[in-house]
Amino acid sequence: MTNADHASLSGDETLDLPEFDAPPSAPLPLAQRWLAEARERGVREPLSMTLATASADGVVSARTVDVKRIDDRGLVFGSSTESPKGRQLGENPHAALQVYWRETMQQLRFEGRIETLTDGESDALFADRSPKSRAATAVAHQSVPFAGASTLAELIEEADALLDRFGDDVPRPSGWVAYRVVPEAVEFWHGSRDRMHRRLRYVAVGDGWRAERLQP
């Protein structure tokens, strides 16, 4: 094997990950542990994930989103219900999330159904964003083309006006909500330069989980 054969794998393949030999009973506590350890190891943006959604007729789209947390029920993020992903989630409430941590050669994959969280939970998630981020979200119609001669500079002026009016308390737009991906399948992956990757998949079965080790 030449160096070019494994140039795409440049992280730490020596991690001690006993879960591949003795899988715990449930995946979400393990995912939370992987996330905590990734932060300790200096992984940059460990919750910057690719979100895949599909329309009612099966047209798939993917984009990067900022997942806010992994909790005991799933993965939480926010978005406009009027954005392309928001419309797809309304038509087809299923999604997949994937993240790859280059520094540690680890990958996490989640597939499951979508829950729309309550107004109170959406308010709390929105309030956790920076004031500038809240103002930008409030004035922009995500993914809608600019009309006529409208410019980004004009949107920035509108956002600044909101900040002048509300300060740090820019209210959440009614169309911006918090979502949770409730996993029905989770995969843990740790890469190896010889391509003998370690893979562990969990599949929801009734009230529990079935763990299975996968070939590379």
Image (cartoon, grey):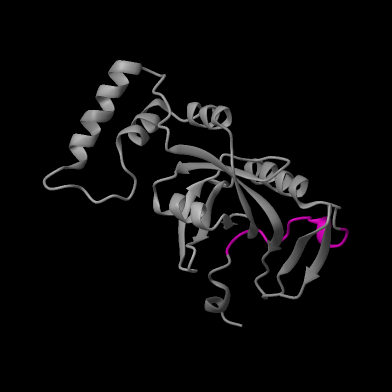
Q: Is residue 98 visible?
A: no
- In the image, the segment drawn in magenta is 10-22
The image shows residue 74, relative to residue 5, as above or below, that is: above
- State yes or no: residue 167 in magenta: no
Which residue in the rendered view is the most extreme toward the right?
22
Position of 85 compared to 39: left or right? left
Rendering coords of residue 77 (x, y %): 54, 42
User: Any magenta on residue 17?
Assistant: yes
Viewed as shown, does residue 57 lie left or right of 158? right
Please tell me which residue is depicted at 45% across the width and 49% down the height of the picture.
Answer: 86
Quadrant of the rendered structure where residue 108 is? bottom right
Q: Position of residue 20 (x, y in %)?
A: 81, 61
Q: Residue furthest left?
A: 149
* Main secondary structure of the magenta stretch: loop
Image coordinates of residue 10 in percent, x first then y, are 57, 63
- Quadrant in which the N terminus is drawn: bottom right
Look at the picture and state if 41 lies above or below 22: above
- 105 relative to 78 in the view: left or right: right
Taking 62 as reference, is 146 above or below it?
A: above
